[in-house]
Image (cartoon, rainbow, N blue to C red):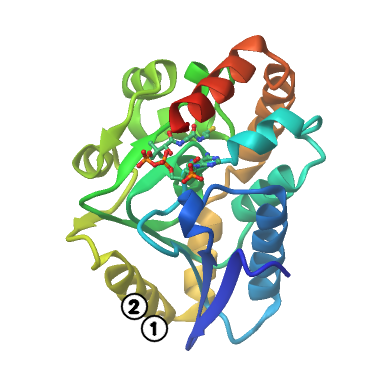
Amino acid sequence: MTNLILVERDGPIQIVRLNRPEKKNALTLAMYSAMADALIAGEADDGVTVHLLAGAGGDFSAGNDLNDFLTLTSLVDSPIARFLLTLAGLSKPVVAAVKGAAVGIGSTMILHCDLAVAAANSRFQFPFVNLGLVPEAGSSLLLPRLAGHRRAAELLMLGEPFDAAKAEILGLVNTVVAPGQEEVTALDFARRLAARPRQALRQTKALLKRDVEPVVQRIQVEARLFEEALRSPELKEAVAAFYERKK
Ligand code: COA
């Protein structure tokens, strides 16, 4: 397993930590694979009651590695889809500790978490359309469900960044805390969940996620469109422009 994903334990809580801080935890295919493996192992481990997603360094995740987009040919059968379907299908509660950049899948991942804490310095963005892409991770279904069509259209069609206060109003996160406190608060949430009767907790999650089937279908429909969009000249231009700005 790559050390770009760290798997830690805090009692009954399994922490899956994105560990590529110098690239703002942008996700490579190997990282998606390692995250899926870690979540599957956590599901199978009776000692684990809650999953916690966190990032090393100052960011949650700047999304998919932009370079990887240029070489990715299939999404439907990729480690990205495997990770997303694993995340969407988890039976144990998932808590996210968000800070800094939460872009693309760094934002859509949160839609699959049961509880989320954001540091006040978090910057969220669903930038897909600006890259010539389409929403992924079931976000075209989950975001309007969470925030209503009007607000989801603003976020997904304009693709502009927004702050933690707005994320709280949208219901994307439960609470906003001072930077540096996000993981402490997320761990506190996770410990409180772990202290609840286990069977009742899992059944409650299952009831809340009863409609997981349409989510899985939407992830697959989006993945097929996303795959086509990966060949768009707009994506190539956007990625080239991103790296040009870095020079
Ligand atoms: N893929 C690959 N590398 C990325 C990345 C990504 N998605 N996001 C950031 N990085 C890298 C940068 O290239 C840079 O690397 P370098 O130091 O070797 O040049 C490093 O991470 C730091 O990022 P930088 O852009 O310098 O930080 P910033 O504070 O100026 O901007 C962001 C932060 C998140 C606004 C900006 O990095 C960004 O827009 N990233 C792309 C987000 C994105 O479009 N993701 C895909 C979503 S589908």
Q: Residue at x 35, y 58 (%)?
A: 58
In the rendered view, does 204 fall on the left or right side of 233?
left
Does the rendering let one see residue 55? Answer: yes
Seen at 47% across and 71% down, the residue is 201
Q: Residues within 10 Å of mark 2 (few under 14, many from 20)?
A: few
Q: CA distance from mark 1 to mark 2?
A: 5 Å
Residue corresponding to mark 1: 195
Crowding near the residue tagged with mark 1, few <14, some 14–19, many ≥20 C-alpha atoms within 10 Å? few
Tally of marks: 2
At label 2, the amino acid type is Arg
Dividing the image into 4 quarters, which one contains the N terminus? Answer: bottom right
Image quadrant of residue 71? top right
Q: Amino acid at mark 1?
A: Ala
The label on residue 180 is none
Q: 45 or 97: which is nearer to us?
A: 97
Residue marked by disc 2: 192
